[in-house]
Each structure stands twice: as C-alpha cells, then as structure tokens.
Amino acid sequence: MALLRFIPLRYKFWAVNALAFVSTLVLVLVAMGLELRSINDTRQEQGRELLHLWSGAQPLSLQGPLRPVLLNADDPALWVQQLLATAQPEPAWLDASVMLPAGVQPALGAWVSTDARGEGRAVIVQAMGFAEVFAQRAPVYAVAVFVLMLSVLFGSQALIRLVDRHQRSLQAMAHYDALTGLPNRVLAYDRLHHALDKVRRRGGYLAVLFIDLDRFKTLNDSHGHSFGDAVLKAVTERLQQRCRTEDTLARLGGDEFLLVLEQLGSAARAERIAEELLELLRQPLPLADGREVFVSASIGVAVHPGDGLTGDELVRNADAAMYLAKTRGRNGWCRYEPWLTEQAMQRFELERNLRRAMERQEFQLHYQPLTDIAGRPFGVEALLRWNSREHGEVPPDRFIALAEDTGLIVPIGSWVLQEACRQAQAWRQAGLGLQVIAVNLSPIQFLHVDVVQHVAQTLRQTGLPARCLELEITEGALMQDTSHAEQALLALRELGVRVVVDDFGTGYSSLAYLRRFALDKLKVDRTFLQGLPESASDAQLVRTIMQLGRGLGLQLLVEGVETEAQRAWLQAEGCRYCQGFLFARPMAADQLSRWWPAGPGAEILAGGQPLLA
Ligand code: C2E
Ligand code: MG
Ligand code: MG
C-alpha cells in the first residue's frame, strides 16, 4: 500500500498485477515444494513398512506409486554389497547422498536391515521430482492460479481506486480547510510563493490581503459553534464572489482569511478591492437555515514589492495592517506602513507579558470615589492597574482590549471582581461608610461566562451584600446578544446586584434597549463634559441625556468632572452623582482608606428611595 503511493496512477494497474503474478508464482512454487516434501515423507515411511513386510516373506511385486526398489543379497553390484554389509536387525535409514551411486538417482535413500536368516535386505525409496509433481497436479494448480489471477485482476482495480481515494483525501486534508473547502495555510503559502516567483520574473504587483472578521469570537461563543461555522461558510461564499480565478482565497484558521491577488496593474487596485470586499460583507449574510446575520471585517493590505519581498514578510505585514484597521474602529482596511512592524513586535511582547502578569501578581486595583454633587463619597469604582516588570505602568486602554482579544480578560476579570468585593467588604467591616463598589465587566465576560453564577459565587465567598455591588457594562455588551443580555440582567437583578451602563452615549444610537433591559443607572460618558459649561451643544446633550434617564427612572452619574465650573453647572441642572478628578483620582486601597472622610458619607437613592434605608 505504502509503495503504491509513489507510483503514478497509469502504472499502478500494471504494477499491482505484476506484483500479483510474481506472488502467485512464488505461492505455487511454495505449495509444490510443500506437497513434494509431504509425498516424499510418506514414501519414506512406506518404504520402512515395506522392508518390514518383506523381512520374512518372499520378494514382493514392486508396482504402485511408491516405486521402491528391493535389493537383496544376491545382487552382485558393489554398492549393493556395501549397502547390505551395513545391515543390522533394526531397520536403518541411509540418506541417498551417503550410499547411492549416481545411477540409482533420483532416490531419497534406503532402508536397510537383516531378515530372519540374517541376510541383508534393502528398500530404496525413490524421490518424487518437481516435474513429476507438476505433471500430476498441473490441472489443480492451473485452476488455482487462474482463480487467483482473476481475483487479483478485479481486486487490484478496486484496491487502486481505494488507495487513490485515500490519497486524495489525505491530500485534501493536508491542503484544504474541511469547513469551507478553501485552501488552508499550507497551500496558501505554496501558491503565494509560486505567485511571487511569477511576479519577480514578469514584474507587476502582487497583493496579500489579511481578512479578519470583527468580534467573531463573541458571536461564536454566544451563538454556538455551529452558528459560527455557518457564518464562516457564508462569508467564504461572499468573498469568493469578488475573486478571479488567478486569485487565491484561503482560510488560515478561525476567522482569518488570506487573499492573494496576482497580476495587479497597480498597488492602489488592491486597496480598491479591499474596499469592495468590505462593502460586500456589509450586506446581510443569508445563512443556510434562512436566518440573516450582519458581519464586518478588518482587512490589512500588503503589496509586493513595496510592503515586503518574501511571502512570510507580506503575510506578516498584512496581518499588522489588519490589526491597525481593528484599532481604528474595525470594519475597515489599512495599508501596511513600516512603523507597524515595530508596533506589532511591541504588541507581541505586551501579549507575552500579559499572559504572565497574573501569576507574577502584577495586577492591582485602584479605586476612584463616586460622590454626590457636593463631593461626599458613597462608593468607589474599581479600576484595574497593571504594573509590568517589563513595561512599567500600562494604562488599561492599552491592555484591556488586548486581554479581550486573547481571552485573558476572563481570568483577569474574575480576579478583579473577587478582589474588589473582598476589599469593599473589608472596608465596610472597618467602618468606612462605603455603600457601593462598582466593577467594570468586559462584554466578553458578560457574554461568555455564566456571569450570574460567577457573581453570586463571588458574593458568597467574600460576604459582600449584593446591594453593594454595581456592575458596569458598556452598551456594546447589551447589543451583541440581546436575548442573553436580557436574561442575565434579570437574573442579576434577582440577586440584588445593580447594573450600570458605562460610557453612556458613546455606543449605539438605538435607545430601545433602555426600556427593554433591567438597568439601574446610566454613567454619562466623560466626553460630553469636555465642552461644559461653555459649549451650548454639549450642554444641551448632557441635559437631554439627564432628562432621558430621569424619564426612565434610572439613576444618573456623570463621569469625568474635572472643574468646579462643570460641577456647578451640573448641580444647577439637578445632577446628583458624579465622579471625576475634581473630587479624587483613582488611588490604591490604603491611600483610599486614608482619603475617605469620617462620617456616614453621602446618601444614595435608588428609584427615589435611599438605597440603604
Ligand atoms: P471607565 O470604566 O469609564 O472608567 C473611568 C475612567 O475614567 C478611568 O480611567 C478613570 O481614571 C477616568 N477618569 C475618571 N475621572 C476622570 C476625569 O475627571 N477626567 C478624566 N480625563 N478621566 C477620568 P482608567 O482607569 O484609565 O480606565 C479606563 C477604562 O478601562 C475604564 O473606563 C474601563 O472601561 C476600563 N477598565 C478599567 N478597569 C477595568 C476592569 O477591571 N475591567 C474592565 N473590563 N475594564 C476596565
Ligand atoms: Mg467604568
Ligand atoms: Mg466610563
């Protein structure tokens, strides 16, 4: 089987049959040899019996298949006399090679003994020859060979087909992606190298497009993997619409696709194609089960020769450009630029160290007071800090997104929740008038993990009452999988935990969710405060948001209050709660214990009632 793999298909048939013929021949010869041996053994045995019968009686007639030759003492031939001279009363076997002259061949040997009168007698046992066996058994062998060859003939065809199919499927497995049928990484690189050879000879441009779906992981994890698979298939079909026969569209794994564009007239052409692909993907994607989904992608473009000379370099640079497109808000394309290489290396380093940060205990929580409009604190927001051995203090903006991309946010986030609850409970027990601890939850945590159970367990372990915990989630988390979000929020409310929409106003324009979900509080994003109180439009925006929140019975907190003028304006507008550098910056736990004023602290109201009534 293994050997067949290396023989070209058209020779395989002959090779198999020649092999079968030779093996049949060998088989026949072996069978004949075995048969010969068995016949000769029988003859030898029968020779002995004959000698025994003969020893007392008259000479026997010598017919039959055995063809033994009886010798007695009367024979004058010298070798006969010598042979008989060795005779003993007990029959002895003498091998032909020992005692027979050439004329008596072919013989196996002779049985010799003395008879009752003490005279020597011998029976020479004739050997059966190869030709003799063959002549006797030819018809049987012929039929056997015929049947064998016939089955080999038909069998070999079936076998070859089997081997070929096996070979082809092995090849397909090694070179094609099983889900989408697209070339995989191995074949993609192979084609890319060929294409590069061509472009080097003939000139022109070659482009590598690195395509990565946006937030595919969230979609996959929240809707299940078969849904994710269906989306990948639909995306493949969509992308194929824009591919020419000379282009190679490959799936590198996960939600990553690679498109190699050959024979391009200009580098700008690749950019236009990237734009067209994005446009195609923005259209709703019909799935096989009749559902429709919306996806978007980020594309990185690298063009030979300007953006890289080798295949590896081009793919790496397209990848770096894709990452830039992601950081610029996704759903777009970016062309490779040399500074990206440096950035990609830094990112790689950062990721490597982020993976180790947990075990090295490099994370710390800082706490920023949440206050009433007069600056009296009632709670704190826990904010994550990474003090890296290699990178120094890394701001959350730089590593939270990375932790989300790599899934590290799940263990990090659960540490944050645990630590924040533990600290808050410790403060409460120490008599600090802390009524609320706010913890940020990433959409990944909110959608992927069984958040309700996790929160309940953390509260049990730390002893913190549920009413003291606020979970801050962004609008994005609510919108990504609305039915899951709805259930999770209801279950959290049942636990007694409060849910806050963080950075309110920066995410989605759809406000319908405010009515639909069980929410407690809005945190107005700090960007709206920047123009206050001078900018009339900013003022109007904040006013409108506050009215909206009040109308829906939600508590409001304004983030990012930095100046006294802002505070005064907010107070005049009836805002009750805020957070900002004007009152306090985020600080370490021990610092906060010292900062926190003695006394009961501010009173907070939920739905018009004091929270800690
Ligand atoms: P956020 O949840 O909106 O947190 C408030 C951010 O605003 C904090 O930045 C805080 O330092 C900053 N801030 C507060 N008052 C002012 C102010 O008056 N002026 C200005 N300019 N900024 C102010 P920080 O700590 O850098 O955190 C940034 C973001 O990182 C957070 O925004 C949050 O989205 C995320 N983050 C922080 N910790 C965690 C965490 O434990 N888990 C998750 N998932 N995200 C976190
Ligand atoms: Mg927050
Ligand atoms: Mg915020």
Image (cartoon, rainbow, N blue to C red):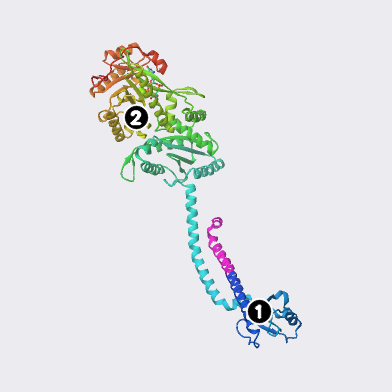
Residue 239's quadrant in the figure? top left
Tell me the residue at 73%/79% (across/down): 83
Position of residue 301 measured from the top left corner of the image (x, y, whole percent) = 47, 35
| Mark count | 2
As for residue 247 lying within the magenta part, the answer is no
Of pointers 1 and 2, the one earlier in the residue sequence: 1
Residue with the mark numbered 1: 125
Residue 433's quadrant in the figure? top left
Highlighted magenta segment, given as a residue range:
1-27
Q: Where ligand 1 lies, by image quadrant?
A: top left
Name which residue type carries label 2: Val
Cα gap from disc 1 to disc 2, whole angstroms = 99 Å
Residue with the mark numbered 2: 455
- Disc 2 CB within 8 Å of nearest ligand 1 atom: no
Tell me the residue at 57%/64% (across/down): 19
Name which residue type carries label 1: Val
Residue 21's quadrant in the figure? bottom right
Q: Main secondary structure of the magenta part?
A: helix
Where disc 1 sits, the SS reads strand
Tell me the residue at 61%/73% (across/down): 37
Position of residue 472 measured from the top left corner of the image (x, y, whole percent) = 34, 25
